[in-house]
Amino acid sequence: MISDLLPPGVLLILGGALLPFLRGPARSVALIVAPLLTLWAVWTVPDGVVMTAAFLDYTLEIVEGDKLSRLFALVFTIAAFGGGLFGLRQESTRELSAAYVYAGSSIGVCFAGDLVTLFVFWEVMAVASAIVVWGGGDARSYRAGMRYLYVHLLGGVLLMAGITAHIMETGAIDVTRALPSTTGTWLMLAGILVNAGAPPLWSWVADSYPASSWSGAVFLSAFTTKTSVYVLIRMYPGTEILLWIGLAMIFYGVIYALLENDMRRILVYSIVNQVGFMVTAVGIGTETALNGATAHAFAHILYKALLLMSAGAVLYQTGGVRKCTELGGLVRSMPFTTLGAVIGAVSICAFPLTSGFVTKSMITDAAGSEHMATVWFLLEVASAGAIVYVGLRFVWFVFFGTDSGLRPKDPPLSMKAAMGLMMVLCLAIGLWPQPLYALLPFPVDYKPYTDYHVLHQLQLLLFAGAAFFLTVPFTRPRETVTLDFDWFFRRFGMMLAREFSLHGGRAGNSLLAGGKGAVGRFVRLVERSHGAGGILARTWATSTAVLSVMVLLFLYLLVYYV
Amino acid sequence: MILANLAALQVVIPLLAAPIGIALRPATLAWAWATLVAIAAFACSVGLFLQVQTGGPISYAIGGWEPPWGIEYKVDALSTFMLVLISGIGASVLLYARRSVEAEIDPPRIYLFYVAYLLCLSGLLGMVITGDAFNVFVFLEISSLSSYAMIAMGKSRRALAAAYHYLILGTVGATFYVIGVGMVYMLTGTLNMDDLARLMPQAAGYRTLEVALAFFTVGLALKLALFPMHKWLPDAYTYAPSVVTAFLASTSTKVGLYVMIRVFFTVFGAPYMTEGIPVADVLVVLALAAMFSGSAVAIWQGDLKRSLAYSSVAQIGYMVLGVALISVAGMTAGLLHLFNHALMKAALFLALGAVFLRIGSVHIQDMQGIARQMPITMACFVVGGLSLIGVPLTAGFISKWYLMLAAFQDGRWWLAVLIVLSSLLAVVYVWRVVEAAYLRPRPQGAPVATEAPLSLLLPMIGMAAANIWFGIDTSFSMTAAEAAARAALGAALGTGGVQ
């Protein structure tokens, strides 16, 4: 078996490393074949530890398979394939190459049986994904990528500190269930949550992903946050704090998406929102909830990729128009892309017969059956919110709504093929959920298509939809804030947001803004003393240096005497 | 016969070979002679290492005068570890040196350079091998004087000022050390380190001893460039010829740390370091200051030699931190980092030396886009840089990992967090170079560089490969560092050490 020799993730990483040396058709073939080979390798990983290596005093379990790891690896591979196909026309080999390394390392994380291997892949992911962000190619994306890299390296620092502490405390390096009770487990949890887009550092998601290129965002949406969900499922199921962190993310995503004008940023806020669902499910921690988190991650990666592909197609065909206010009425010239966006949107809304329906309801149901009334209610409210902001907001203002006069054509065949693949998958999972359920880590006795579920969901959709269309005149995205009713709406949104701040939403951001200011001041202070010509960087006169030595000797004597 | 006298040969070979070098005027001949001698010295160290590994510590009485009256060469796990490192780096740098020295040093003085190099090497080896506190001072002066001379040979006129500055501070440091030795001699009447350790309890309680410790601390902190006594180092590294920088950065400060370990743990003993006098706490604070301040300065330096010099100041902080934890784990981590850091800085400075040979500058502005023209050199630089950051699968990761484990073992998890946080600063100053060399285009009108010659590339690749090798297979470095740590702490703590 291939996984005895080479971890499946490394196969894809090698594929990515090969890309820069290929041109023309060879490059296209490699782009298609590398994920397919990986898919086969992932599929054939058996249960148990397959590949080990000795490192320091430990035995690393580089590849360890089970249902959960295979399922996540599977969807990551599909996302890589879809992204590669979609990005076939991407001229920047650097971006595609980095994207495959990024995808491969996230697959590596899935199969990592020990914390050291996990950490190695985790860091490769951080660097590779930053390069994908830089694929945006302008100064804005460079700065966003840099900020992104620093947030993730900070997360890596926490994770690494946590891992060493954990090994010190327990002597074990296995990736197993670890409730946050010790310094080590808390630090690890913090490090993992940074990648999930959890508060207080959550703004990196909306900051960096929209700065990437039309194809880069498709990759970015799939891996980082979901790898984090995977590790949370594996290590921290049933940790109560995750419940509240998840809910905070859900509402953060909704509220910010409502105030956003950049089409991809709307979609990106919804990543935070959807990952919030999964994190909440991990916090609930029952078998149904974990199944739900896994299934929802699977479905989410596919429809989010589809949505970002349709946004990417718009971006590619219009030559970089990002704002909802400048788009509209594209259905006339981009019917296929519109279809993709609609299918993605109905999936994210959890419309019956789509993938979102058969997965998200597992999570809400898990909350219901655990008698977590507050959580259940909040999840329902947020589901309704989700419908409004992407389901309708993105699709309506970009493809329907006021005609912008733009007439871009549907994208080239390869991009259409990638979108088609995702559409088929979204619908297929919605229509025939059983194969997916069979792959879930725990046995499933969940029936999505009961009268109650379907009616309940349709009701929710109906009301949310009605609410959206009634408020269309007021919620139309605006370039500038004008003093009409819209202003009131925005103010209301802001008020809502401020209310919400009690639970961390805006507070997190304002703290972050305050923090940024403080950091900025601190950096300037350090630069003054350490920068070129600063007191600590200057060459001191010999006499000064000798004098300082005398002073130090004096201080030492003082310290030693006292 | 040879095997029994390896301890003496270790120092005597380079020491006697140096004056012979004066007769070998042609540059290539001088180089060949020095290289041959350095390789012989390396062979001696490996031999000693194997002897100690199988037969335990060796005590060698110079001239047949038994210790504590005569000078004793004391070869144990700690000293052989250092000997292998120093002579290994010394030989590799010489293999690299020929072309670089031809380009950077006045041709008529080249043979003198090699003489100074051998003297410096023998001084460093002597400091490590001797078991006599005063003899350390003698070798310290030999190595220091020759390094002042080597630094002064730098092309820039500032090299002279840098060497002078180093001369003053180095002399102050050495004088402080010898004052410390004088004070303990006054109290105990002996200069042999083991004998000092034995007699130390009788001297306990005298104020003189505390004063001696203060002089030792400041004097040695100067030699090993511990913050805030590091100001001589950046100029010296920046203006010295590339080869000298690579050699000194990988060996000289390390030997300073070695002597500090010897004085603190062999002579004074670990209990003295923790009870009553907060030496260890002071060192922890200074080490942390070095880690952050050094890295911060490195971020804003345009001249990369200077940037890396400040990074050395920061890395010395890691080593001192490990030592100051006063546990076997901490000492092991400190020594491991000492070893690994020597490899990183050797790789980095050798790469910069090659760049300097080709474009005559190592300023970050001048190195824009250089990676396309010198791909192998810059790849070696990146490997060294990754190791400096502490990326997994490089040597730097191993030592930071053990340093963190030691911090956790000590119950100071905040120290572990600070260790990784400060390594983020290394990301910044290494990344700057990667960005300039790889992502920027070569500026218009910039000199076209070609890849460095093979004689430079091979030792450089060797050092880069060593960074990866010792990041994966730690059996040598780890075992040696642990044995060395036990040897250093063993006398004071019993063979079990502090757990």
Image (cartoon, rainbow, N blue to C red):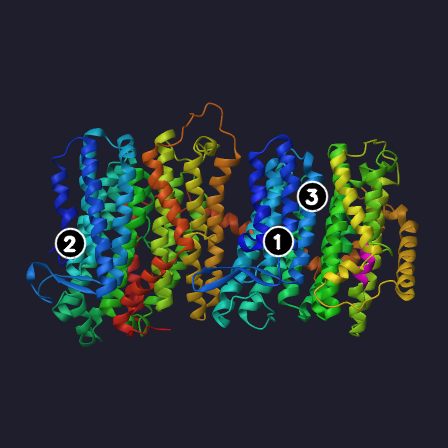
Do the numbered discs 1 and 2 sit on residues whose CB atoms are within 8 Å? no
Taking B430 as reference, is A405 left or right?
right
Examine the rendering and report whether any part of residue A147 can be seen: no
Quadrant for residue A241, please give it. Answer: bottom right
Residue type, label 1: Ile
Cα–Cα span, label 2 and label 3: 67 Å
Q: Is residue A471 above or below residue A136?
A: below
Circle 1 chain: A
Kindly identify the residue that appears in the image at 57 percent across and 57 percent down: A155
Q: Chief secondary structure of the magenta span? A: helix
Disc 2 and disc 3 on one polypeptide chain: no
Kindly identify the residue that appears in the image at 88 percent across and 35 percent down: A332
Residue type, label 2: Val
Q: Position of residue B156 (x, y in %)?
A: 30, 33
Cα–Cα span, label 1 and label 3: 15 Å
Do the numbered discs 2 and 3 sit on residues whose CB atoms are within 8 Å? no
Name the residue nearer the viewer: A299 or A525: A299
Q: Position of residue A257 (x, y in %)?
A: 77, 51
- To which residue does mark 3 refer? A83
Secondary structure state at the residue bearing disc 3: helix
Quadrant for residue B133, please give it. Answer: bottom left
| Quadrant occupied by the N terminus of chain B | bottom left
Local crowd size for mark 2, using a 10 Å CA cut-off: few (<14), some (14–19), many (≥20): some
- To which residue does mark 1 refer? A107
Disc ID at residue A124: none
Circle 2 chain: B
Taking A212 as reference, is A481 left or right?
right
Range covered by the magenta-colored residues: A355-361
Quadrant for residue B116, please give it. Answer: top left
